[in-house]
Amino acid sequence: MDSYITQGVCSKKINFTVENDIVKEVSFVSGCPGNTQGVARLVEGMNVHEVIKRLKGIKCGGKSTSCPDQLTKALEEYLNK
């Protein structure tokens, strides 16, 4: 399982597993439970590139990022390793 420390959102960290470019599991530490659990369940089983395409750039209120956007940053970092 990989981890990513978030920036600029209520969630503190994202734990995730990717196998063969498929997102297998995602869990957010802190943040709005309903939204973060919903995002996690929606992306599990999806291709990592499709998750990035759909969620990148989403903002939360007046913030320049969001938990879904932070997930894309985590996945991009994972792909660039």
Image: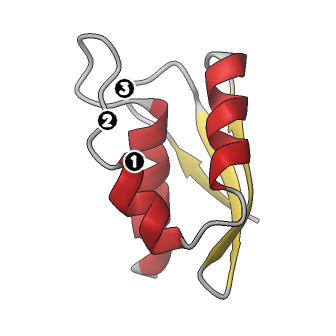
Q: Residue at x 66, y 47 (%)?
A: 42
Please provide percent x and percent y for residue 54: 38, 53
Q: Residues within 10 Å of mark 1 (few under 14, many from 20)?
A: some
**Residue type for callout 2:** Ile
Residue drawn at 66 percent across, 88 percent down: 20
Q: Earlier in the sequence, mark 3 or mark 2?
A: 3
Q: Please tell me which residue is depicted at 59% across the width and 82% down the height of the picture.
A: 21
**What's the CA distance linking mark 1 and mark 2?**
6 Å
Of 32 and 14, nearer the camera is: 32
Q: Quadrant of the N terminus?
A: bottom right
Label 3 sits on what residue type? Answer: Gly
User: On the image, numbered disc 3 is attached to which residue?
Assistant: 8
Does residue 73 appear anywhere in the picture?
Answer: no
Q: Are marks 1 and 2 in contact (CB under 8 Å)?
A: yes
In the rendered image of this protein, does residue 13 appear above or below residue 59?
Answer: below
In the picture, measured across the screen, residue 1 lies left or right of residue 52, that is right
Q: Is residue 34 above or below residue 40?
A: above
Quickly name the residue at label 2. Answer: 58
Q: CA distance from mark 3 to mark 2?
A: 13 Å
Looking at the rendered structure, the secondary structure element under dot 3 is: loop
Residue 65 at what x, y percent from top left? 31, 31
Q: Is residue 50 above or below residue 3?
A: below
* Label 1 SS: helix
Q: Amino acid at mark 1?
A: Leu
Q: Secondary structure at mark 2?
A: loop
Residue tagged 1: 55
